[in-house]
Image (cartoon, helix red, strand yellow):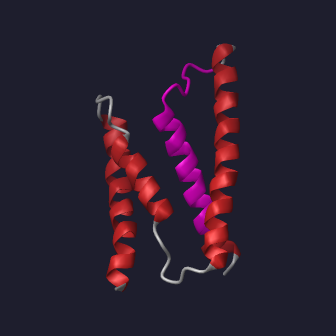
Amino acid sequence: MKTLIKFPLYVGLFLIVLGIPVLLTSKSSTAEIPLLVGLFMLFISFQSKEDERSTAIRSSSALFALVLGYTLKLIISNLYQHQIISFDLTSINYFLIIVFAMANMIRYSRLYIFMA
């Protein structure tokens, strides 16, 4: 039973490790999909002990990451419009990668570093 709980975690980590080089080296228009799916699977994977605290941490981490991600998107768009930087976040997939990456970092740091 524990193996079934950890399977999405391992698949998510594998897709993240596979997705980063694919994103950086591939010229395909769908190169970000493995990384995005891996980050999502890591975010929705259950802990071995799932309780109200871990569920609340997951949902509040998603909310905080969404606010930070949208703020970052607005800053990047503003800097791009003023020609300070040469790239813009036009694809929703890259925005979702930023949000899920921040949500995972916030979630796992709150679970294992700050609450230890």
| Residue 107 spot, x, y in % from top left | 61, 64
Question: Up-down: is 6 above or below 33?
Answer: below
Task: Tell how many labels.
Answer: 0
Question: Up-down: is 6 above or below 12?
Answer: below
What residue sits 39% from the left and 51% below the top? 37
What residue sits 53% from the left and 84% below the top? 49
What residue sits 28% from the left and 30% below the top? 28
Q: Which residues are magenta?
A: 85-109
For the residue pair 59 and 110, the one nearer the viewer reads as 59
Image quarter in which the C terminus is found: bottom right
Answer with left or right where residue 3 lies relative to residue 91.
left
Image quarter in which the N terminus is found: bottom left
SS majority, magenta: helix
| Residue 94 spot, x, y in % from top left | 49, 36
| Residue 30 spot, x, y in % from top left | 32, 34
Is residue 108 shown in magenta?
yes
Question: Up-down: is 90 above or below 92?
Answer: above
Is residue 4 shown in magenta?
no
| Residue 110 spot, x, y in % from top left | 66, 69
The residue lying furthest to the front in this view is 52
For the residue pair 113 and 15, the one nearer the viewer reads as 15
Answer with left or right where residue 108 lies relative to residue 22.
right
What residue sits 29% from the left and 34% below the top? 26
Quarter-of-image position of residue 77: top right
